[in-house]
Amino acid sequence: MKKVLFATTALIATAGMAAADVTISGYGRFGLDYNDANATETNLTSRLRLQFDMSTETDGGVTLGARLRAQADNTDGGTARGASWNGARFFATYGGFTLGVGNIFGGLDNAPGLYLETRSTGTGVDGMGFNSLVTNVNGGAAGLLDEYDNYDQYSSKGAGQNGVEVLYSAGDFSGQLSYSKENSSDAKRTAGHVAYTWNDWTAVLGGQDSNQAWEDKVFFAVMADLGQYGVRFAYADNDGIDKYGLYGNMDIGAASNVVLWVTYEDAVSAADVTAGRFDNSLDGGTKGTSYGINYSYDLGGGASFEAGAAETANDQTQVQAGVAFSF
Amino acid sequence: MKKVLFATTALIATAGMAAADVTISGYGRFGLDYNDANATETNLTSRLRLQFDMSTETDGGVTLGARLRAQADNTDGGTARGASWNGARFFATYGGFTLGVGNIFGGLDNAPGLYLETRSTGTGVDGMGFNSLVTNVNGGAAGLLDEYDNYDQYSSKGAGQNGVEVLYSAGDFSGQLSYSKENSSDAKRTAGHVAYTWNDWTAVLGGQDSNQAWEDKVFFAVMADLGQYGVRFAYADNDGIDKYGLYGNMDIGAASNVVLWVTYEDAVSAADVTAGRFDNSLDGGTKGTSYGINYSYDLGGGASFEAGAAETANDQTQVQAGVAFSF
Amino acid sequence: MKKVLFATTALIATAGMAAADVTISGYGRFGLDYNDANATETNLTSRLRLQFDMSTETDGGVTLGARLRAQADNTDGGTARGASWNGARFFATYGGFTLGVGNIFGGLDNAPGLYLETRSTGTGVDGMGFNSLVTNVNGGAAGLLDEYDNYDQYSSKGAGQNGVEVLYSAGDFSGQLSYSKENSSDAKRTAGHVAYTWNDWTAVLGGQDSNQAWEDKVFFAVMADLGQYGVRFAYADNDGIDKYGLYGNMDIGAASNVVLWVTYEDAVSAADVTAGRFDNSLDGGTKGTSYGINYSYDLGGGASFEAGAAETANDQTQVQAGVAFSF
């Protein structure tokens, strides 16, 4: 009585039926996390993501579709959690234009050159708090300026922002502009980016304008894909807090890849602290230099071994190793 | 690693396997909502529905199956919500008989001639509160006699009623009888309908008997499908509140359809207000005449453009436009 | 626009794609439950289970995968509930070894010879509280020593334990060892079993060691599969409470099967009550002899008619009848 979905992109169109389709995909990952900031330093970390993509094409050539995700995470020190379903993102695509509605990607968060060149898009198995991002300052996911709070991004297990966005790409150019508004808080955010590629190099400029405190951001990155090697520089002004990042990645042999990163985050200005604009007690201790390394080994079949280590500016050490697979 | 489900009804039966199957379907829709009763008058409105239908057939020719739905709605003024999963409806079908158990359709709500002849089954993109239904009185979805509270119906994102129902159809006749009982409140509802079609005409008689206040209902409708044109008249006695509706729809050209509707709802009787049976302060202001229009344009591929406008008796104006697609 | 998943195990491998796959399966069941301990004695009982299994195989022959489930239950006296999603279980299999991570099966709960030889793995349509299990004492699912609380097991609609386990099988031998730790409560459980089969007989030894009160368990079972007949004896020491069970099942004709069971549960020792180790007021009245019968008739197509009756030691009578189908 089992149903096995076919691992193929074929689409059988029968008479009288529209070419609408549903795609199921996702990934699983699990491993061990050592974090000397946790009471119990070594824990299991895991995630299962299950994603449904639906789309159809109108007679006029517009693709209409939506995405819905479930995610089951166990990342917080041994506490297990059941799967949560997120809010839907809808889209309409015509040529190089895409309109997105609902749980939007966000014009800044979706910029190329922001996330790490790894499977977790951060360090190790679960990303380790994504301290490698230059837009993630003042304590990151655990602190006051949470990357998940202070600029719009696609939520994989929450409702997201209910915004609207336009994406455009033509040849070597791509860009995005997003807008969201919360009726309850009257928060309004406009975010966007442009990216241009010439030869092996890509330059990115992005940012966000918000009517809320701490949320204005400017982001710049330049990166090169030199075949076996890759290098990237990124900078962000996070409403007055500068953060710089330098990133390198290298293929080793047929199956291995190593990513190295170092970031420097400026202190919150004394004037801002005095004015109560930032609360030093919540700064997360990420001021200064953080660095990390990620090692990936391709196991075949869409699976890989992932290991990583990171040291944050406040001497927190985190090490992870595990496996990841896509389906 | 993507799985693309096949857009076909073919079923490959291999030796030693039962012919059980799972079907994934659903729809997406998104657009803009203008409502002069909201503090922020213009908002995004959207819904993604994902539906799983499972069934198998016994050696004796009985089809056993179930339906489960997820729904992600963003309809209430800019607040985003993640997907919710509903309660399951189970069924057993043999010939013209179907037994339903669990999250039942409900004998009154499932009557033909009740909902509007539109994609949203109401007006515009999201139905606009379904004021066009004659069983929806005294404030409708927002008021005291909530259509979703005072008679049994299938819940697309809640648990539903855990009831039982029998559906029967033979030739031009169809009927349904449902029963539900809540152990916590001791609420008991019996609902049903019969429908008969002759030539282009269909007549429907339905109702509900309940041991709870305000829940006794009688529903009558007669409608004609005249090819390019359709017309319908409906009436309901909602435990003392009469409501009448007149509905017309017309195909225009190859791809357009227009639906017009007008309803008249009687005031709550003074005796009922005096007796405390109805609370005028919660009556939703729908007493009197409401009307609306819906325009649909077929985009192909199972998608359409939908626009609508409605004016309720208390001078609330709502206008919507957007797209909808099925998968 | 419907997608019908193919009832086949075929897998089309196209160039450049990994052989990762997703399988959707599950079951539905519904029927009537009579329980003279309920205020309303007769109620509907139903469950829909929807299961996603994902897996891929590495070049080295290791299978990596995960399982996620949704379950919608209506078993508690007429109150309907929507579907809940559980925590993910991840696994890596190589040869006879399997490593499990996350929402683990649990080394004791997954032992052969523990659950009843029926479709519900208990009595009737929904298992009737699983009083037939010798590891379920002192009131079972409703009481102090809840089977679902006092030893690790896979949770079908909750997050589960976030543990780790190893399963091994080679020829006639199989075994399992599991470990879980909750950071919040510091609860630590180690559980396991070994099973050996010779000719028609299988012997099983299992248990759990915990740092929490009432959770140490020893389990033993011996059973024979004699073709048309099956017989099983089971015993458990539940941290001082002995429980014995005797079970028989018989095929009748081509499509029927009957299962009979009787269990005897020792009283909690007076010393334990005096010491406050057990609370007699919560003992669930299952001390003494309980017994039950289950009848199953194969309807074809993966469906069956299921009926059962059980009498617990405290004179609670429960009778159920309904249908079940797999997909």
Image (spheres, coloured by chain):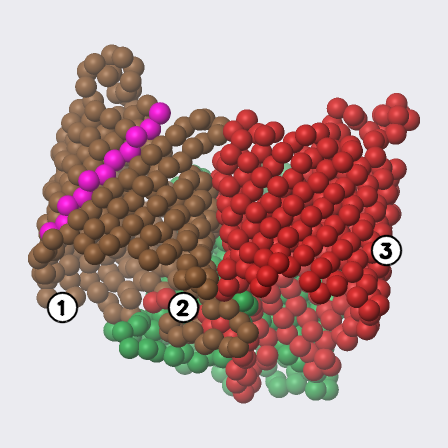
Chain colours: A green, B brown, C red
Q: Earlier in the sequence, mark 2 or mark 3?
A: 2
Residue A12 highlighted magenta (yes or no): no
Assess whether mark 1 and mark 2 are in contact (beta carbons under 8 angstroms): no
**Alpha carbons under labels 1 and 3: distance apart:** 73 Å
Q: Amino acid at mark 3?
A: Leu
Quick one: label 2, few (<14), some, or many (20+) residues within 10 Å? many
The residue mark sitting in front, 2 or 1, is: 2
The quarter of the picture where the N terminus of chain A appears is: bottom right
Question: Disc 3 sits on a residue from what chain?
Answer: C
Q: Amino acid at mark 1?
A: Ala
At 54% from the left and 79% from the top, the residue drawn is C11
Please determine if labels 2 and 1 lie on a single subunit: no
Please determine if labels 2 and 3 lie on a single subunit: yes
Residue B208's place in the image compared with C127, above or below, is above
The residue that mark 3 highlights is C205
Report x, y in % for residue A55. Answer: 38, 68
Residue C45's place in the image compared with A85, above or below, is above
Question: Disc 2 sits on a residue from what chain?
Answer: C
The residue that mark 1 highlights is B254
At 79% from the left and 39% from the top, the residue drawn is C264
Q: Residue furthest top?
A: B274
Overall secondary structure of the magenta stretch? strand
* Drawn side of residue A74 relative to residue A15, left or right: right
* Drawn side of residue C148 relative to residue B150, left or right: right
Quick one: label 3, few (<14), some, or many (20+) residues within 10 Å? many
Assess whether mark 3 and mark 2 are in contact (beta carbons under 8 angstroms): no
Q: Secondary structure at mark 2?
A: strand
* Residue C162 seen in the current view: no
Q: Which residues are magenta?
A: B201-212
Question: Disc 1 sits on a residue from what chain?
Answer: B
At 30% from the left and 59% from the top, the residue drawn is B324
The residue that mark 2 highlights is C3
